[in-house]
């Protein structure tokens, strides 16, 4: 037999890693609840056509694409937003707005596996659909801030921009959308020189090249100051000025409502996905160069999928990357100590009783295992100790005759002879 291993880019999560992933997922669910987002579940497989429509060149090239047995061209989802836009354009078309939708699950991108970049990874994704107001953008920023803070991450920073500023300039220069998208991709890859070179090839005016040269350099931690500088640079470009005003309103709301997170505002910031139309952002921790989450406004996507014109703004957080950031920052998982119990029958004929007793503990809500390896008590206890099981229940003949068991507190190395009910109460009464 060959030795099987996981497919390149795929990972097994052992219990400790799985626990971390679920911990972040749980925090994401809590955040959804707090902000009024309802969970939906969409399929892992979607039509290639849907997923490739507005995903952007980079994502399109990295999709797992195949033909199913019915000859349909299918892809594994590389993101959630396309599926949600499909739903809003069809099934949820007549639902009252705003819609606040949350989903969590695995995504697939044929990226080169490296630190924090996997071919299968998990995201928590939130979409606020139906509002073009800056307060909707702020909700998405605020819930991201809440999630990142709630798992205990420190010193994280938002990077914020607005695609309408540069697109506005390019539109006014008569540069068609496709070419604009090409420019945005170059900006996303931080290929500044190439961006300016391409602008010249697209016959942009000297003023345009000069403005972009300045904008690329415009960034800072004081939002009001950055906005002022951008305003100076975009003079004469009306659509860009309107976009900047929209960004300014969002930043003022963040500032004045004292949501409180550190940020850098960057005029030349772009993201890989083509569908953004407004504010965009990413979140970073100082220990990692790659973003732990990112999102933005996309007001045209739902319409593109055949729906009513519907403004929307959303975010996706990388669950794997948040877990990685927690590791880097040595953030402890805030979890109650488990009150796990191992039930060990001391004699073959006490097995049935042991199973019944384990069942009573579980009914009381206490996680309980039963010894299934037929080991001696000392071996079973050794193993329980190694795995941090808190208590052992010994089902012994003499005690059983009196309807009692031996409850061992493994941490304290104490034991008591109790009825099952007393043992349950004694465990439940221990504060964790
Ligand atoms: P995107 O869908 O590209 O906007 O990405 C949103 C977030 O998903 C990123 O900020 C990352 O945290 C996470 N992410 C994206 N691609 C990967 C990947 N290949 N591996 C792990 N996490 C990823």
Image (spheres, rainbow, N blue to C red):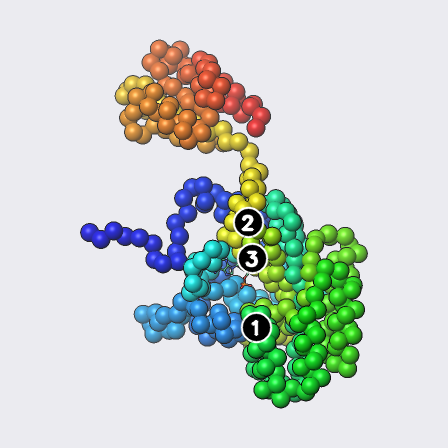
Residue in view at x 55 percent, y 42 percent = 330
| In the image, the residue with mark 1 has its CB under 8 Å from the nearest atom of ligand 1 | no
Q: CA distance from mark 2 to mark 3?
A: 11 Å
Task: State which quarter of the image contains the C terminus.
Answer: top right
Residue 278 location (% of width, % of height):
67, 70
Q: Residue at x 49, y 71 (%)?
A: 58
Looking at the image, can residue 139 be seen? no
Which mark is in front, 2 or 1? 1
Q: Which mark is residue 325?
A: 2
- Number of numbered discs overlaid on the protein picture: 3
Front residue of this view, candidates 172 and 140: 172
Q: Name the residue located 61 percent from the left edge and 50 percent from the top edge.
A: 148
Q: Mark 1–mark 3 contact, CB under 8 Å?
A: no
Find out whether the residues at labels 2 and 3 contact each other: C-beta distance under 8 Å. Answer: no
- Label 3, secondary structure: give it: loop
Percent x, y for residue 208?
69, 82
- Quadrant for residue 236, please give it: bottom right
**Does 234 sit above or below residue 257?**
below
SS class, disc 1: loop
Tag 1 residue = 191
**Distance of mark 1 from mark 3, alpha carbons?**
17 Å
* Residue drawn at x 44%, y 72% as measured from the top left: 61
Q: What SS does tag 2 mark? A: helix
Measuring from the top left, give residue 302's x and y in whole percent.
59, 72
Residue at the far left in the pictured view: 1
Q: Earlier in the sequence, mark 2 or mark 1?
A: 1
Please name whichever residue, 75 or 329, is drawn nearer the observer in this view of the structure.
329
Question: Which residue does the numbered mark 3 point to in the structure image?
Answer: 289
Query: Does 101 appear above or below 239?
Result: above
């Amino acid at each position: 037999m060959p030795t099987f291993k996981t497919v390149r880019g795929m990972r097994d999560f052992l219990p400790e890693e799985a626990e971390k992933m679920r911990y972040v997922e749980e925090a994401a669910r809590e955040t959804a609840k707090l902000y009024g987002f309802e969970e939906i579940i969409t399929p892992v497989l979607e039509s290639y056509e849907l997923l490739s429509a507005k995903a952007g060149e980079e994502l399109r090239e990295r999709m797992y694409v195949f033909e199913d047995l019915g000859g349909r061209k299918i892809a594994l989802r590389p993101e959630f937003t396309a599926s949600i836009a499909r739903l809003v354009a069809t099934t949820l078309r007549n639902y009252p707005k705003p819609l606040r939708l949350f989903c969590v699950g695995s995504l697939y991108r044929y990226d080169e596996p490296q630190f924090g970049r996997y071919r299968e990874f998990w995201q928590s994704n939130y979409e606020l659909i139906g509002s073009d107001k800056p307060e909707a953008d702020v909700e998405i920023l605020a819930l991201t801030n809440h999630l990142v803070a709630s798992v205990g991450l420190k010193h994280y920073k938002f990077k914020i921009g607005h695609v309408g500023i540069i697109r506005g300039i390019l539109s006014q220069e008569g540069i068609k959308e496709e070419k604009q998208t090409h420019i945005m991709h170059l900006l996303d890859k931080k290929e500044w020189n190439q961006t300016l070179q391409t602008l010249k090839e697209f016959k942009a005016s000297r003023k345009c090249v000069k403005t972009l040269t300045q904008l690329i350099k415009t960034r800072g931690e004081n939002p009001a100051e950055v906005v002022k500088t951008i305003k100076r640079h975009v003079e004469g470009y009306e659509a860009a000025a309107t976009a900047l005003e929209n960004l300014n309103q969002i930043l003022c709301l963040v500032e004045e409502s004292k949501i409180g997170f550190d940020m850098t505002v960057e005029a030349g910031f772009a993201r890989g996905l083509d569908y953004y139309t407004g504010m965009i952002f990413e979140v970073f921790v100082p220990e990692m160069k790659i973003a732990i989450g990112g999102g933005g406004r996309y007001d045209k996507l739902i319409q593109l999928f055949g729906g009513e014109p519907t403004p929307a703004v959303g975010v996706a957080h990388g669950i794997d990357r948040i877990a990685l950031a927690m590791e880097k920052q040595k953030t402890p998982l805030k979890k109650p100590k488990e009150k796990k119990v191992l039930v060990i029958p001391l004699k073959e004929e006490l097995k049935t009783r042991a199973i019944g007793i384990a069942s009573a503990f579980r009914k009381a809500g206490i996680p309980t295992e039963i010894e299934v390896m037929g080991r001696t008590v000392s071996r079973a206890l050794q193993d329980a100790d190694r795995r941090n099981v808190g208590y052992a229940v010994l089902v012994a003949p003499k005690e059983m005759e009196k309807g009692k068991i031996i409850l061992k507190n493994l941490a304290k190395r104490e034991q008591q002879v109790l009825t099952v009910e007393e043992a349950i109460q004694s465990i439940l009464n221990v504060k964790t």
